[in-house]
């Protein structure tokens, strides 16, 4: 067994310089409040105090103090929730980014990790041992929020959403007691932790994870199309989607700043809209990867640039994705799961391409095509295709055309939506778990958080 404290690059600037506890009347309160979010579009909500936990004992003490004072608690780990669900008016904001312990049992193919561990950091450590876990696609996304909400990670079509690979949790309950939940102990809390995301009613201080073997081949294949090919692509994706092998995360991104091919000059609001068709692949060998991507030969004609299937270091895979998510940017996101037909989707998507805001705004089409069954867990809403709209702006003059873009686009598609992902939390009322799962969650919350110590998901209030 190996043990380490992972170097966390989880989006908390100058964490060590922050005071352990900051209250509203302290100088630096607002900087500390803002620093809890990766999204620069910080909501105008103001907790009374921000407490930085460095240990499980700190978490226990913070919950007991909040209980004694009758205060509610918001929790953050990496601050990558788009809506700032953890930033609430009044009460305590408990920052878990300091809990970054990792242990790895290579023989048992298991690990434990604190909620503040950055997924990319964990993966780097695991890959050195020949191991793998489906962490999120961007650097900085911490395990805390990521694992609770589902976790659509690298190779997740193959090994399941990350929460499916959580075997147990250690958590602090609403009374400030440290507990363990597994399939044989406090089972209902493990069920809830696997998918309730920002609606979880406890504080996870340690995740127990099932690991996988590092895929022998990791690489990608990419093609760029002009916007005029969008209709052909949508019809093709719809036709092949259910049959795409699970080793392939087929997706396309519509934007004015494609990451492929690597840009020669900076994209501007006048840059043309392009479509990147990307096929990251993780397989047991290069020949298996080639076989899994053979269907790409049927892709629509009219591509401008393309690469062959190339092996790629994980670092380069992360960097490619990060090009679409610059930091210090204001973001408004919205999303939908759908199995709607191309004829139903196309009027909306053609409008999206025609009215694409300036970079880094973009739209993602992810082919998900889930298996027919999953283990019993709160994670219950998914569909054939995932569509997400990321409205991002740095320049205030771009705000007017971008702030409402994702929300209005998804509102117009409501009749085609089978629900939303917590991952791209739109912070509005929406169905992110099935109705039966929601009923079960409410009953569990009533039992485990009788005083309403923990906030509900902001979209449910
Ligand atoms: C640039 C970017 C890229 C992303 N890429 C992906 C991706 O590839 N796949 C994917 O699935 N998601 C992705 N996400 C979404 C991300 O996984 C979620 O927003 C997730 O909630 C982030 O976790 P966090 O701990 O960093 O966020 P936080 O904002 O800290 O937490 C989000 C919410 O989770 C809850 N929470 C967090 N920690 C705890 C805890 N220890 N105990 C109890 N509750 C807790 C709280 O309710 C909190 O409001 C991405 C987000 C961004 C900004």
Image (cartoon, rainbow, N blue to C red):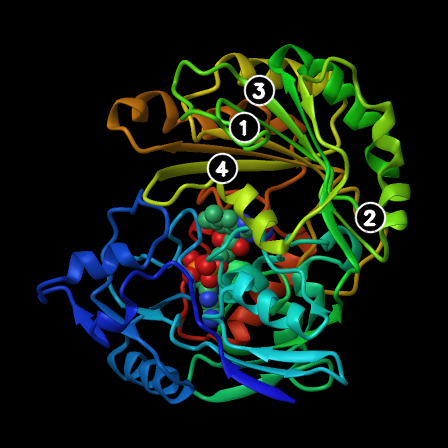
The quadrant in which residue 292 appears is top right
Cβ–Cβ under 8 Å for marks 4 and 3: no
Query: Which residue was labeled with disc 1?
Result: 258
The mark that comes first in sequence, 4 or 1, is: 1
Q: CA distance from mark 2 to mark 1?
A: 25 Å
Q: What residue is disc 4 on? A: 324
- Observer able to see residue 5: yes
376 relative to 402 in the view: left or right? right
User: In which image quadrant can residue 350 be found?
Assistant: top right
Tell me where residue 400 appears, x and y as whole percent. Answer: 31, 22
In contact (CB < 8 Å): disc 4 and disc 2: no
Establish whether ligand 1 lies closer than 8 Å to the Cβ of label 1: no
Tell me which residue sits at (70%, 46%) in the image: 382
Q: Earlier in the sequence, mark 4 or mark 2?
A: 2
* Mark in front: 2 vs 1: 1
Q: Is residue 344 above or below residue 386?
A: above
Q: Is residue 11 above or below residue 243?
A: below
Q: Is residue 89 visible?
A: no
Disc 3 to disc 1: CB gap under 8 Å:
yes
Q: Nearer the viewer, mark 4 or mark 2?
A: 4
Provide the secondary structure element on which disc 1 rests. loop
> Is 290 on the left-hand or right-hand side of 262?
right
Q: Quadrant of residue 60?
A: bottom left
């Amino acid at each position: 067994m190996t043990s380490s404290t992972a170097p966390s690059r989880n989006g908390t600037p100058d964490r060590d310089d922050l005071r352990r506890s900051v209250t509203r009347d302290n100088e630096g309160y607002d900087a500390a409040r803002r620093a809890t979010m990766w999204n620069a579009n910080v909501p105008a909500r103001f907790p009374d105090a921000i407490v930085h936990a460095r240990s499980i004992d700190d978490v226990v003490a913070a919950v007991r103090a909040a209980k004694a004072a009758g205060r509610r608690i918001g929790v953050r780990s990496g601050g990558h929730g788009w809506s700032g669900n953890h930033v609430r008016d009044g009460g305590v904001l408990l920052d878990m980014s300091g809990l970054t312990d990792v242990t790895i049992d290579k023989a048992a193919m298991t690990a434990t990790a604190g909620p503040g561990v950055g997924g990319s950091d964990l993966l780097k450590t695991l890959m050195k041992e020949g191991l793998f876990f489906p962490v999120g696609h961007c650097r900085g996304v911490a395990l805390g929020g990521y694992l609770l909400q589902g976790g659509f990670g690298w190779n997740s079509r193959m090994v399941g959403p990350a929460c499916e690979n959580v075997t147990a949790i250690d958590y602090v309950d609403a009374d400030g007691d440290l507990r363990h939940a597994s399939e044989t102990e406090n089972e209902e809390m493990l069920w809830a932790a696997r998918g309730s995301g920002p609606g979880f009613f406890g504080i996870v201080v340690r995740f127990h994870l099932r690991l996988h073997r590092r895929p022998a081949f990791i690489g990608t294949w990419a093609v760029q199309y002009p916007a005029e090919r969008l209709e052909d692509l949508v019809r093709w994706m719809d036709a092949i989607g259910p049959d795409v092998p699970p080793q392939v995360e087929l997706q396309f991104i519509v934007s004015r700043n494609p990451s492929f091919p690597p840009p020669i000059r900076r994209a501007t609001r006048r840059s043309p809209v392009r479509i990147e068709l990307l096929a990251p692949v993780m397989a047991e060998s290069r020949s298996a990867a080639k076989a899994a991507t053979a269907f790409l030969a049927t892709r629509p004609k009219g591509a401008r640039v393309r690469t062959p299937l190339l092996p790629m270091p994980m670092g380069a895979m992360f960097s490619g994705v990060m090009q679409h998510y610059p930091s210090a940017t204001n973001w408004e996101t919205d999303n939908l799961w759908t199995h709607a037909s191309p004829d139903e989707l196309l009027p909306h998507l053609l409008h999206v391409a025609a009215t694409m805001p300036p970079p880094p705004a973009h739209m993602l089409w992810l082919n998900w095509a889930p298996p027919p069954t999953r283990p019993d867990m709160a994670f219950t809403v998914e569909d054939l295709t995932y569509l997400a709209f990321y409205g991002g702006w740095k320049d205030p003059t771009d705000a007017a055309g971008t702030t409402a873009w994702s929300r209005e686009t998804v509102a117009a598609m409501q009749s085609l939506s089978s629900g939303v992902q917590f991952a791209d939390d739109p912070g509005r009322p929406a169905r992110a778990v099935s109705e039966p799962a929601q009923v079960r969650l409410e009953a569990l919350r009533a039992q485990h958080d009788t005083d309403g110590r923990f906030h509900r998901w902001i979209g449910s209030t």
